[in-house]
Image (tube, rainbow, N blue to C red):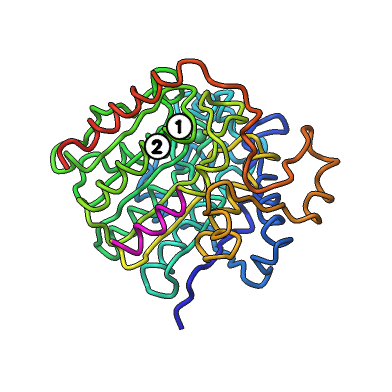
Amino acid sequence: MMANAVFIQPPGAARYKFNEQHPFNPLRLRLAIDLLQELDALKSEDIIEASPASETLLSLIHRSDYLEAVKQLSLDPPPEDWVQQAQRYGLQTEDTPYFPGMHEAASAIVGGSVLAADLVMSGKTLHAYHMGGGLHHAFPDRGSGFCVYNDAAIAIAHIRKKYDVRVLYIDTDVHHGDGVQWSFYDESEVCTYSIHETGKFLFPGTGFVQERGAEHGFGSNYNVPVDPYTEDDSWLESFTASIRKVAAAFKPDIIVSQHGCDAHAFDPLSHTHCSMRIYREMPAIIHSLAHEHAQGRWVAVGGGGYDIWRVVPRAWALVWLEMTDHPISSTLAASDANEPLPAGWLERYSSMSPEPLPTHWMDDTRDWPPIPRRAEIESSNRRISEIVVQDL
Ligand SMILES: [Zn+2]
């Protein structure tokens, strides 16, 4: 029987941890999963494990010398001659430093995203969610921006190779999905779309409107860079109009979406000013597009998100609630609706969180300070998103 949605959590993914101080903290996954379990929206027996990706899978995107570098630098301690090479493979930066077991942990994450793709493409489930995936900055020959292996790109390459269908990749992380974009830049059967804070001010410094794809891939790459301090209304207006047109024009057979939740006002690594509202509405739009254009086939992965207590658990839980048509999801769809978070979750974590935890699913933005230049930001974003889809 076909399942409606499956939840994938590879056991090794929790070991993807650079160091104690690093913002990319695997505790994020625990917090989000616990939130869903407190709500009874996810039972332990419904969590599917995945095996680590094989070298053959990793090679769909990554160069063999890079794979060797990752493996050598995973040893504890790594061989001195490979330590000398770490810099050139992007694995000796403050953002992406090598760590013991890095190859195994990163392969586990890739395994989760590939399994999600296989379960959806083989018709065992309509939707699949791998919260630990979405490492969209990794390149074929180097690590970048907290990402060692690009699980999203590998899952897409695997779908192309094994099933030969058209893939629409939607990246809603506040950072440009550069690693995935460049991996398929000259391919016509993979369409990449990314909405993010403009690269003028934010890592990785790319993702401009003019990046449209190359050769056969020209016209199957879309970027919607928004201004710093963008708020919910403008973000959602820019997203909704453009992604609907892109999906209708491209006609995907499957949608792969990345759900980084770092555009939130509380996030320490970006300058946009959105609330939880965009993390309820974007998954709902993507869900409807999957049913409209791709017979429901939808793979969702996680991504960035560095306010691990106040933002990530709610945002990532909302993806699953939307995917499974949970009643809370429909309740929250009404404007101004809100629902309390489960008391058990708040009790368990409030003493651990450095900031007071939110008590409800949606943010109460009424006491947020107003953003100066709001009208200017909105009209600039509107202009940009119109240019993106002007030919569609
Ligand atoms: Zn990000």
Please determine whether, in this image, residue 337 is positioned above or below residue 9: above
Disc 1 marks which amino acid? His
- Mark-to-mark CA distance, 1 and 2: 6 Å
> Which one is in front, 90 or 202?
202
The reply to whether the magenta stretch includes residue 265 is: no
Disc 2 marks which amino acid? Gly
Q: Which residues are magenta?
A: 282-292
Classed neighbour count for the residue bearing mark 1: other residues with Cα under 10 Å, few (<14), some (14–19), many (≥20): many
Residue at the image position 45 percent from the left and 65 percent from the top: 127
Q: State left or right for residue 245 relative to residue 3.
A: left
Residue at the image position 39 percent from the left and 51 percent from the top: 154
Q: Position of residue 158 (x, y in %)?
A: 35, 58
Please determine whether, in this image, residue 83 is positioned above or below residue 100: above
Please determine whether, in this image, residue 66 is positioned above or below residue 294: above
Q: Position of residue 68 (x, y in %)?
A: 47, 41
- Contact (CB < 8 A) between labels 1 and 2? yes
Q: Position of residue 189 (x, y in %)?
A: 22, 52
Residue at the image position 72 percent from the left and 41 percent from the top: 358
Quadrant, the C terminus: top left
For label 1, being within 8 Å of ligand 1 is answered: yes
- Report which quarter residue 388 is drawn in: top left
Overall secondary structure of the magenta section: helix
> Which one is in front, 59 or 161?
161
- Report which quarter residue 296 is drawn in: bottom left
- Kindly state the secondary structure of the residue where label 1 is placed: loop
Q: In the image, which disc is placed on residue 175?
A: 1
Q: Position of residue 369 (x, y in %)?
A: 61, 22
Please determine whether, in this image, residue 154 is positioned above or below residue 3: above
Pointer 2 residue? 177
